[in-house]
Amino acid sequence: MKILLVGATGRLGTALGATLAERGHDVLGASRSDAAYPVDITDPATIEVLYERAGGVDAVACAAGSTPYKPLDRLTRDDYLSGFLNKALGQIELVRQGLPAIAPRGSFTLITGILAREPIVTSAAASVANGAVEAFVRAAALEAAPVRVNAVSPTVITEALDKYADFFPGFEPVPLERVVQAYVRSIEGAETGRVFELG
Amino acid sequence: MKILLVGATGRLGTALGATLAERGHDVLGASRSDAAYPVDITDPATIEVLYERAGGVDAVACAAGSTPYKPLDRLTRDDYLSGFLNKALGQIELVRQGLPAIAPRGSFTLITGILAREPIVTSAAASVANGAVEAFVRAAALEAAPVRVNAVSPTVITEALDKYADFFPGFEPVPLERVVQAYVRSIEGAETGRVFELG
C-alpha cells in the first residue's frame, strides 16, 4: 500500500515507518521539517498541499499531535483551545481533507491516548483533545464507509518511561512495538470505528 | 443550595430549574437573553461578569451548548471548531472560571450526550464536542476535589422526538424527568468524575 505517515520523525512515527516499510509498504513520511512532505497539522493550508503532493493514498497514519500539560488551576482557555487545535482538529482535518484522496477501502489511523478514559493530574487539556479524537473516530467511521477510520490509544509507552514515569504512577506501560502493531492492524485489517486501547 | 443554572430557558433548563426550586434550592437562572444573568458561554468575558454577579455558589448546572449537524462530507473545519467552542470549551470555561467561586464541596454538572459514544449520521461535530466534555469531566474531577465535576449524557429525549425521531431510528428515548433527576443526583449527591449515561 501507499501510506502517508504524518509525524514520521517522532519516536512512534520512526518505529511505525520502519515496520510499515519492512512489511512492503510504500511509506511517504511527512513532518513539520520534512523537505518533500512538510506539514503542520494545525495549518489546514499545509494539509492541502500535502495531499496535492502525495496524490492518491491507500492509508493515512498519524503519529502527530501535542497538547499542553498543566495543573487544572493553571490551565488557561487558550491551553484547552491549543490542545484541541493541534491533536484533535489537526487530525480531524487530516481525515476531512483526506477523504477525497483515499482509496475506496483505505484507512485513516489517528493517535489518541489513555488520558481520554484514565486522566492523570495535569492532563485536563490532553484528555479533552483525546476524548474529541476518539468520539470523532466513532462518528466519522459511520459515514466514511467503506473508507475506514480508527485510532490507537496507548497508555504510557515503555520506551518513554524515563521521561514520563512520574506522571503515571502504577500505570502499566505498553511497549512501543505493541502500539506499532495496532496501527498495522488498523491499516491492513478491515475494522473501522475502533479505538484500539492499549493499557 | 444556591445554584447557578446556565441555559435556564431551554426545554431542559426550564424543567431542571422548576425541579430544583421545588426541592428548596435558590436557583439563579442564566441565559443569553436573561436580564439579571446574561451569559454567552462562547464569550469568556460574559462568564466572568456572570460569576461576579452571582457571587459564591454551591453548584453550577449547565444545560446550554449547541453544535452543527451536517453530513460528514459537508462539515467544514469551522463547523468542528464552532461546536467545540460552544458546547465543549463554553462549558469548560464555566468550570475553569467557576472554580474560585464554588463552595468547597460544590459541584459542576455539565451536559453532554449519547453521541460521544453512539454517533449517528450528521453527528461528527457534535460527537467531538461531547467526547471532549466527557473526557474533561473525568480529568477535572481528579484535581478539583473536593469540588465535584460531573456530566449528564442522555440519549434523545422523549419530549423532543417530534423533532429528532428521524435522526435516532431505534434508539430508546429517555424522558426529560430522568435527565433532570440525573442533575439532582449530581448536585445533591457526593459523586464526582461521573458521566451519568441515560440511554
Image: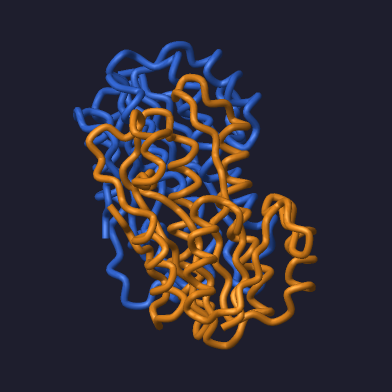
Chain colours: A blue, B orange
Q: Position of residue B199 (x, y in %)?
A: 27, 52
Query: Which is more toward the observer, A27 or B55?
Result: B55
Query: Which is more toward the observer, A105 or A5?
Result: A105
Q: How many marks?
A: 0
Query: Which is more toward the observer, B108 or A127?
Result: B108
Seen at 42% across and 76% down, the residue is B192
Q: What is the quadrant of residue B29 in the picture? A: bottom right
Q: Position of residue A198 (x, y in %)?
A: 27, 55
Q: Is residue B36 left or right of residue B91?
A: right
Query: Which is more toward the observer, B32 or A138?
Result: B32
Name the quadrant of the N terminus of chain B: bottom right
Vertical position of residue B22 compared to residue B166: above or below: below
Residue farthest toward the bottom in the current orientation of the protein? B104
Q: Is residue B70 left or right of residue A34?
A: left
Seen at 53% across and 30% down, the residue is A93
Seen at 33% across and 47% down, the residue is B117
Vertical position of residue A195 compared to residue B190: above or below: above
Q: Position of residue A193 (x, y in %)?
A: 29, 36
Q: What is the quadrant of residue B30 in the picture? A: bottom right
Q: Position of residue B103 (x, y in %)?
A: 60, 85
Q: Is residue B21 left or right of residue A158?
A: right
Whether residue A17 is visible, yes or no, is: no
Q: What is the quadrant of residue A27 in the picture? A: top left
Vertical position of residue A180 compared to residue A163: above or below: above
Whether residue A97 is visible, yes or no, is: yes
